[in-house]
Image (cartoon, helix red, strand yellow):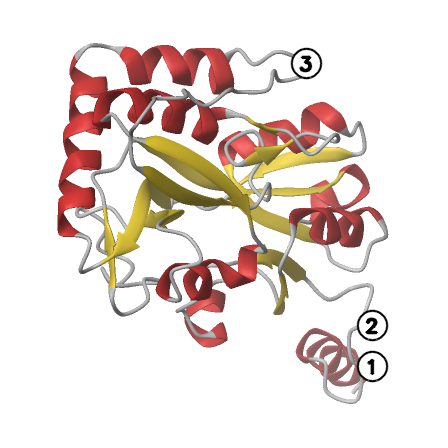
């Protein structure tokens, strides 16, 4: 009889029957930058955690992690390394056994086919002559502790393209403390400007307003990520709004997690 009661107690403990619900502190809540076309259900399918908290800006998400309002941040590997390098309390955890990878592209309105073709040609040329590899090495693989600002070329008499930047994916999409655009994406844009012979005006926008800024013609180009063609886990139109065309990818990065050191062993 004692053995039976002991077994019953163990079953109730494991199953949670009759026990307390997990506290808010024990829940695995993951922070992510707002995904503009994926539903919360779709997003959760590709993230660890009991729940997702969406943030429209990077600083709010990072503050939520520091204050333990969330257990981790889901982001890209380069961003994860940036976070860990700038905060000794943060540690990087790999995503999962089958890694998720995103392609970084520029997005524009579907009707702007000529602009897309120009960007595609510039990106392919930058891959072929090694320029993209050099920029990856300078801004991502071996970045300076304080990233330099990036100046846009000024081309007399050339048309101007407005490009939206958010600063919410450092060191990729980065805005320095003084408001100056910097980082990898800005360096890529500077090089594209020279190759398409057009001026680029950088317009700071909220991350959650990227698609609206593009479709309303507030800007002509935004940064975007898409699912690689060989990804069998996610739909190919995952998080890509209607009426938006994307260029050839110029960078690829794995999805990782950043958590506090005190949570790392449980993550």
Whole-angstrom CA distance, mark 2 to mark 1, is: 8 Å
Quadrant position of residue 38: bottom left
The image shows residue 20 at horizontal and vertical percentages of: 83, 81
Residue 34 seen from this side: no
Of the 4 image quadrants, the one containing the N terminus is bottom right
Q: Nearer the viewer, residue 148 or 193?
A: 193
Q: Are marks 2 and 1 in contact (CB under 8 Å)?
A: yes
The image shows residue 77 at horizontal and vertical percentages of: 50, 34
The image shows residue 49 at horizontal and vertical percentages of: 60, 63
Residue identifier under label 1: 20
Q: Is residue 139 left or right of residue 194?
A: right
Q: Residue at x 45, y 23 (%)?
A: 152
Q: Residues within 10 Å of mark 1 (few under 14, many from 20)?
A: few
Q: Residue at x 50, y 73 (%)?
A: 40
Whole-angstrom CA distance, mark 3 to mark 1, is: 46 Å
Q: Is residue 187 left or right of residue 80?
A: left
The image shows residue 256 at horizontal and vertical percentages of: 52, 41
Q: Residue at x 82, y 64 (%)?
A: 25
Quadrant position of residue 52: bottom right
Above or below — where is 210 with respect to 21?
Answer: above
Residue identifier under label 3: 145
Total marks shown come to 3
Residue identifier under label 2: 23
Q: Residue at x 20, y 43 (%)?
A: 115
Point out the tag, 3 or 1, that comes first from the N-terminus: 1
Q: Are marks 3 and 1 in contact (CB under 8 Å)?
A: no
């Amino acid at each position: 009889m004692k053995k039976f009661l002991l077994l019953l107690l163990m079953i109730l403990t494991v199953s949670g029957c009759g026990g307390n619900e997990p506290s808010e502190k024990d829940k695995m809540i993951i922070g992510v930058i707002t995904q503009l076309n994926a539903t919360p259900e779709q997003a959760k399918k590709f993230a660890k955690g009991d729940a997702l908290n969406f943030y429209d800006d990077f600083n709010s998400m990072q503050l939520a992690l520091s204050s333990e309002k969330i257990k981790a941040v889901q982001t890209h590997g380069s961003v994860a390394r940036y976070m860990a390098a700038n905060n000794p309390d943060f540690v990087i955890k790999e995503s999962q056994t089958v890694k998720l990878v995103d392609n970084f592209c520029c997005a524009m309105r579907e009707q702007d086919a000529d602009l897309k073709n120009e960007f595609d040609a510039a990106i392919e040329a930058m891959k072929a002559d090694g320029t993209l590899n050099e920029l990856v090495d300078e801004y991502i693989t071996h970045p300076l502790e304080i990233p330099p600002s990036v100046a846009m070329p000024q081309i007399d008499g050339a048309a101007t393209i407005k490009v939206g930047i958010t600063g919410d994916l450092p060191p990729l999409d980065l805005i320095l403390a003084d408001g100056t655009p910097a980082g990898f994406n800005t360096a890529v844009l500077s090089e594209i400007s020279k190759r398409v012979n057009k001026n680029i005006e950088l317009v700071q926008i909220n991350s959650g307003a990227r698609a609206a800024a593009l479709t309303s013609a507030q800007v002509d180009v935004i940064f975007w990520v898409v699912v690689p063609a060989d990804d069998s886990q996610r739909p190919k139109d995952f998080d890509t709004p209607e009426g938006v065309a994307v260029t050839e990818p110029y960078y690829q990065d794995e999805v990782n997690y950043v958590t506090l050191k005190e949570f790392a062993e449980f993550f």
